[in-house]
Amino acid sequence: MSQICELADLQRLYHKRVPKMFQGYCESGSWTQQTLGLNKSDFQRILFRQRVARDLEPRSLASQMVGQDVKMPVAIAPVGLLGMQHADGEILAAQAAEEFGIPFTLSTMSICSIEAVAKKTQKPFWFQLYVQKDREFTKKLIERAKAAGCSALVVTLDLQMIGRRHADHRNGMTAPPRLTLPNIIDIARRPKWALGMANTRNKAFGNIQGCATGVDDMSDLMKWTAGSFDTKLNWEDIRFFRELWQGPLIIKGIMEVEDAKECVKLGADAIVVSNHGGRQLDGARSSISTLPEIVAEVENQIEVWLDSGIRSGQDIIRAKALGAKGVMVGRPMVYGLGAMGKAGVTKMLEIFHQEAELTMAFIGHRDIANVSRKDIVFQEETFKN
Ligand code: FNR
């Protein structure tokens, strides 16, 4: 543990401990992976302005996200099939997040069910919704999230169609036997692959949680997903969910100003500027390069957050400087989880917190709320004057 200083150390350990196929599922982007690359490289173009001789005591990253107090403005992004990366993955990541003091978002596509995560955690977590064609079923998911005490609903809009990820295709991405997705399995209408659920753990893969049974082949799951997710979704439908869910509503997957304005109109509380970690539309701009224009238009009407490409505490400060009120992290959490379970997620959060706090101090601030556009310069501008 003492050897782990940065996210890359956790990532190395992750590569040793998690089966290749699941690494591919986590790390790959769609098609040529151009957007996946831009998400990271564009952060490197943002340079800090160092300040000196400032009173740097006391320092705090404490913030609020949709009214919730957070130790730093970071939430765990919804990541599907976390139980593939580590047994009980969703539960462990949720526990690490709540103990650290930031929100955890449970994916619709999780292996542990909403109820199972609620049972093993003390504080409310957030639930992420993929809208299904079957509205009754979608409503039922929301009802379950309410009953489990979830404190915010994250509706992801950028996965009406599934981006093609070549790594998954090449790897065969054959899910282990006894893998299933209790959030989406309606007992009465189980898809073929979900028949015969059993709460057993698959020992063959070691790291794998097998809450139930049925998904023998990932292509079955992909087919099911493609057939069930709503390809006709429109803003009127989202309005319907706004009415159903009275708590904080977060819309994820926004990359254009016009779409951000729609979210404001329907009364959402926050948007996540996100290209799904480069897993959907390849050739799209990076989230961080898109952020400033969206912030400029809607900042005072809705909370604007960002995900896709955050790999350090410095990136949190960069996003903050460009106007993000908060960020979400996906793969960094998976690296921690696959590497060391709950302790790995905690380690990742500690590293990000230390890096963000130190960077904030170097640019002359004690409170993250004061970080602004004035604290950074784009690499292209460095030699201008
Ligand atoms: C995701 N993401 C995602 N988003 C979502 O709304 N529901 C989901 O089930 C998933 N599943 C998922 C699986 C995996 C393996 C990854 C890597 C990502 C997208 C996720 O919430 C987030 O937008 C990205 O992960 C952010 O990019 P970074 O932090 O991974 O660069």
Image (cartoon, rainbow, N blue to C red):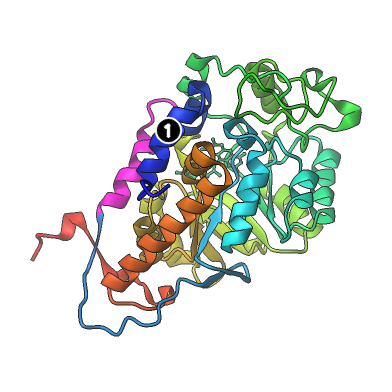
Ligand 1 under 8 Å from disc 1 Cβ: no
Ligand 1: quadrant of the figure? top right
Queried whether the magenta region covers residue 169, the answer comes back as no
127 is higher (above) or lower (below) than 16: below
Please provide percent x and percent y for residue 1: 43, 47
Please give left or right for residue 199 compared with residue 94 in the image. right
Please give the name of the residue rendered at 55% of the width and 14% of the height, measured from the top-left corner.
172
Give the residue at the far right of this rendering.
188
Please provide percent x and percent y for residue 211: 75, 31
Please provide percent x and percent y for residue 14: 46, 34
Q: What residue is shown with label 1?
A: 282
Give whichever of 175, 133 is nearer the camera: 175
Res. 116 visible in picture: yes
Which quarter of the rendering shows the C terminus? bottom left
The magenta stretch spans which residues?
28-45
What secondary structure is the magenta-colored segment mainly? helix
Please give left or right for residue 187 compared with residue 214 in the image. right
Please provide percent x and percent y for residue 243: 79, 59
Quarter of the image where one finds residue 376? bottom left
Please give the name of the residue rendered at 47% of the width and 52% of the height, measured from the top-left corner.
347
